[in-house]
């Protein structure tokens, strides 16, 4: 973290910042992006203090910022890609301030960083890992058992999963998407093709896809490594018509975008909120209510840093969610319908294009994919 430029400005990577957020370390951030971009999406954390002064307000000097920057904390200057933050950071250093950093790669890099967190051990040997995409709110999973691995809800930075599996002496045999994603580009098919794995997708979400896939349907067992480590798909529509959850090792419930720690999935990203709201209610209040309340819920997204637990893990006991999650307390059906069709945040950035990409109908460049994914995830009803 202490690599310095000739001017004394230091570099902080997205991984450095992620670890500080997860460990609740103090950090002061000066974000120099436009006000609208800042208001839409920013770095957040329990011990993060952040202000926004647009770059163009600092072109004639950093005096407007100096009085607001504490001398006792590390200061991180952030912009979209890196250049503006270096310029501003160097001026702050020249003004006599120490412990000044810029974010390497800017918010684009922050959006893409994945931090692996161990969820737990599996009964017959092996481990389950959660990959926290802290700048985007996406959560992916890897099950490792007896030299084999499966990746669930893979994001497009697929080399992270490939490298992680190799470092654990495992070969990726399966990649699976719980549903057709609308807020980020899936890397499941790409990773499967590259490593020779099987790609699984719920068929009800795959009616328009242009590529081959294996049908992910309720009642199947997908074995990884030791035969006692099984993944049981559970059909759980509502966020999409094909949404499918997994029970892993009779202990973990991977809920995709149906159920989160502090909210529930929205049913409108294919334009069918009125059609799917009944499915969403049945999944949450009927199907999930019949499962063991001791299952550990592992969602595909989080909306707020308050959902990050120990070491950054995002999880909760199912029984606790039925007591505390606002989306599971709406017992009147008409009130539930109103809540999940009217009480919705803005839709994700470029979500229609992302859906088209995940169907194989669009082939955006790497730069275009980065741009499509910029901003927060908005897959939940209550995340505003």
Image (cartoon, grey):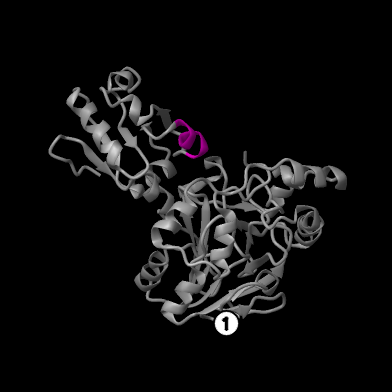
Task: Count every numbered label the image shows and give the total.
Answer: 1
**Residue 16 % position (x, y):** 33, 46
Name the residue nearer the viewer: 359 or 196.
Answer: 359
In the figure, residue 51 lies in which quadrant? top left
Instruction: Tell me the quadrant of the picture where the N terminus can be found.
Output: top left
Q: Which residue is labeled 1 in the image?
A: 227
Question: Is 252 in front, or is 233?
Answer: 233
Q: Position of residue 301 (x, y in %)?
A: 57, 53
- Residue visible at 48% across and 67% down in the picture: 363
Q: Which SS type dominates the magenta stretch?
A: helix
Residue 279, by quadrant, is bottom right
**Residue 308, image x and y in percent?**
52, 45
Where residue 14 sits in the image (x, y, percent)?
35, 48
Per the rendered image, the range of residues in magenta is 35-41
Left or right of residue 11: residue 27: right
Q: Residues within 10 Å of mark 1 (few under 14, many from 20)?
A: few
Write the residue at 69% across / 49% down.
264
Q: Is residue 353 magenta?
A: no
**Is residue 147 visible to us here?**
no
């Amino acid at each position: 973290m202490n690599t310095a430029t000739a001017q004394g400005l230091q570099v902080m990577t997205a991984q450095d910042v992620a670890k500080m957020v997860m460990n609740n370390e103090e950090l002061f951030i000066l974000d120099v992006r436009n006000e609208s971009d800042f208001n839409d999406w920013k770095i957040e954390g329990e011990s993060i203090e952040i202000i926004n002064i647009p770059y163009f307000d600092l072109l004639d000097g950093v005096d407007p910022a100096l009085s607001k920057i504490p001398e006792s904390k590390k200061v991180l200057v952030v912009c979209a890609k890196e250049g503006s933050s270096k310029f501003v950071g160097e001026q702050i250093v020249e003004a006599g301030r120490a412990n000044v950093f810029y974010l390497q790669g800017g918010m684009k890099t922050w959006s893409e960083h994945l931090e692996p967190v161990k969820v737990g051990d599996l009964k017959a040997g092996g481990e389950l890992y959660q990959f926290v995409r802290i700048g985007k709110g996406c959560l992916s999973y890897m099950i490792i058992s007896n030299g084999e691995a499966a990746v669930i809800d893979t994001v497009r930075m697929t080399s992270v999963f490939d490298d992680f599996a190799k470092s654990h002496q495992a070969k990726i045999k399966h990649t699976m998407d719980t549903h057709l994603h609308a807020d980020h580009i899936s890397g499941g098919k790409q990773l499967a093709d590259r490593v020779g794995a099987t790609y699984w997708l719920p068929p009800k979400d795959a009616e328009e896809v242009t590529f081959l896939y294996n049908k992910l349907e309720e009642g199947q067992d997908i074995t990884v490594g030791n035969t006692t480590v099984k993944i049981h798909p559970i059909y759980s529509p509502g966020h999409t018509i094909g949404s499918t959850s997994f029970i892993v090792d009779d202990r973990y419930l991977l809920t995709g975008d149906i159920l989160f720690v502090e909210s529930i999935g929205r049913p409108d990203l294919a334009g069918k909120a009125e059609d799917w709201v009944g499915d969403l209610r049945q999944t949450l209040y009927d199907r999930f209510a019949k499962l063991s309340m001791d299952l550990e819920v592992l969602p595909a997204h989080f909306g707020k840093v308050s959902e990050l637990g120990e070491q950054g893990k995002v999880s909760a006991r199912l029984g606790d969610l039925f007591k505390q999650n606002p989306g599971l307390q709406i017992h009147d059906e008409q009130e539930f319908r109103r809540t999940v069709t009217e009480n919705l945040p803005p839709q994700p950035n470029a979500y229609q294009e992302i859906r088209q990409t995940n169907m194989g109908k669009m082939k955006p460049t790497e730069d275009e994919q980065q741009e499509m994914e910029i901003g927060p995830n908005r897959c939940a009803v209550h995340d505003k």
